[in-house]
Image (cartoon, helix red, strand yellow):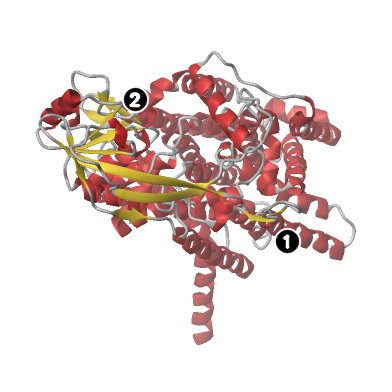
Amino acid sequence: MRDNDSAVRSSTAIRIISAAPERVVLMTVALALAAGLAVTVGAHYWWTVVPGAIALTALGWRACAPQPATPRAALASGIALIGTIAWTVVNIAMAAEYVLVVRDPGFLSLSGLWLVDHGSTDIPAAAAIDASAGTTQIVPDANEAWNLKGDVVQPQGAKMLPATIAVGGWLAGETGVLGANAVIGAVGILAVFALARQFLSPMAALAPAGALALTVSHIGLSRPAYTEPLTLLLVIAGILWAWRGVAERSTNLLVTGAIASGATMLVRVDGPSYAIGALAGVGIALASMEADARWRRQAALTFAAWQAIAVGVGYLSVAVWSTEYLQRLADETHALLAVYAVLVLALAVWAWTWTGGPGQWLARLSVTLGRTGAMVAGGVIVAGLLVLASRPLWTTVHRSTDNPRHQFTNGVVESFQQSQGLPIEPTRTYAESTVTWLSYYLTWPIVILAILGLGWATMRMIRRDARWAVFVGAILAPTLLYLWRPSIVPDQIWAIRRFEPATLPGFILAAAAAGWAIAAHLQGERLRLTVRRTVGVAMLVLPLSTWISISPGAEFPVGGAVNVTTREMIGARDQIDDLCAVADGRPIALLGDGSHFGSLRVTCDVPVVLVFSTPTESQLSTMAQGFGETPVVVTRKSEKVTWTEEPTVAVQSTVKHSAYTLQGIPRSIISRNYSWYAGTVNADGSVTPITTGHTATAD
């Protein structure tokens, strides 16, 4: 009897451990969905998000039950869990202090901090509206990142990520918010592991999961509050559940995958690019698979409907809570949505024609093409990707000079080129080098193997292995879009963001598939095992090798990937805290530094106005009257204010972050030195200096 009880307990433990990675993915996606939905209706509180996450997890629990467990699967899952826990601890400890709006993580982190204690991201402008009335030189918002709508200021961007990282704030305050994206990045690694073991052995699936964990891009984008790790989680989870839905003939799994892939619109306004790929892949998979026509038709329509609902909710969320941001990107967003809508309609019409035998004309096409035709189709994909990789050899892509946004970007690129000693070509987009960007993080051997893997996956799809249609569609659609036209400032690691959600994990998974497929065609079990182990080790060692660079003859011949070895924006948190201490609960007039507008409004929780150029005493006096109390002026340019006596520095601070590089991974640090002057505004508009002597330096 004891032996029987022990066997039952052992079997239960194996089942629980084996299922744990996919269960963690489900629970995290459910939490993100609950947070995203709650903030969309303006009700982001722990008592709405937590029950919502539990309910969504319960709804998906049975549908997403992992396949039968084995001791080997449990061992691999245990290793994956321990590895990601260690990865999480290290990266939370190294989490960025991105509370200045130098780039996107600034307003996303601040939005998350605001949502810890508020139901929506709308921030009351309060007395700042009256204080800025009657002049264009004083405003209650701050250009693009913080936009006035009525009597509230709206932070830029979609809201699922701020809503999700705010959960960390309920657990650990400001530190919890700043470290939460590292947890999301870790769960993304588990999602890659769970997807990889759909076509690899459990132990082999550790290789692509480990490869993602060791890429500088995934580490560097998970420590600050970038949206891409959460988008990656949704994209890969969507592929995982749609893959299983096709393989297991499960409508519920397909619905779960549809919601996950459609919810990318709640994270990013380009979410439809990922939804389009998933929809196309699932449509082809269902059209070609061996199954009852009625089930295939219903599954296709159900997938399209649920995904469209998720995309629609995401669009509504951005339209309501970041109205001006959506208006600025209306052309690009609406073009993507139009393509998506056409594809949904096309799939719906196509699905209604599925009345004959399984697979219909796609089955006949597969038979007609045969193995040779499938290999040709795979070869076309390989050739196309190799052509994209070769673009630096035969073309240089430029942007226009007549568009105001392009003019600004041209100036930024020119400054990067000057600082790095590169040829001055301000209009150069570097879009011809997008495949090369991937090689910075994955290395060329993995990139080449991945290209072969995508060709192999296409061949499997043509041969009616329907599962691979899901993968090929979901990965290739956004990959080809952004390889051709990344539409981003081309410095690293900023530019690799375009490829973090789908391309980087997709290439890693495709490389693993290619390596194991090559091994399977070799003669002799020992040789096959050797090749598999070599590929597995290479997938871990090669991304790790990018952490170090050796440049003989340089001043510093050995360089490290600073996005791995340092904390981004260290010193920013203390600087803002010190400025809030100077303000001491009084309204703030911020002179000239829009990057700090949201930081002061959210962290100090007082009304803030942004003052342009040099204000007159009359303007400052009128502003003070509008506030209804004595405001504090903070500025880095003391000459812009009329002081009652010579001011001294109130806050001295140094903030460090990675350098901007156009042709490689950042290997150096930029130190930004801040000297802040502060004073109270008198009735006549003069300013009395405040002297505190706060000094904050980056460790």
Residue at the extreme bottom of the image, as rendered:
2
Q: 55 or 397, which is in the foreground?
A: 397
Type of amino acid under label 2: Thr
Q: Is residue 405 depicted above or below 310 in this figure?
A: above
Which residue bears the numbered disc 2? 323
Give the image location of residue 360, x and y in percent. Answer: 68, 27
Q: Residues within 10 Å of mark 2 (few under 14, many from 20)?
A: some
Q: Name the element at disc 1.
A: helix
Q: Residue 71 placed where, x, y %? A: 61, 70
**4 or 676: which is nearer to us?**
676
Residue 584 left/right relative to 410: left
Q: Nearer the viewer, residue 288 or 307?
A: 307
Callout 1 amino acid: Val
Specify the quadrant that holds the C terminus: bottom left
Disc 2 to disc 1, how far (Cα)? 48 Å
Please tell me whether mark 2 sits on a helix, a strand or a loop: helix
Of labels 2 and 1, earlier in sequence is 2
Q: Are marks 2 and 1 in contact (CB under 8 Å)?
A: no
Identify the residue at horizontal 29%, vertical 31% (top origin): 640
Front residue of 82/561: it is 561
At 28% from the left and 54% from the top, the residue drawn is 693
Q: Residues within 10 Å of mark 1 (few under 14, many from 20)?
A: some
Q: Is residue 130 visible?
A: no
Residue 605: x percent and y percent?
22, 43
> What residue does disc 1 label?
537
Above/below status of 607 relative to 91: above
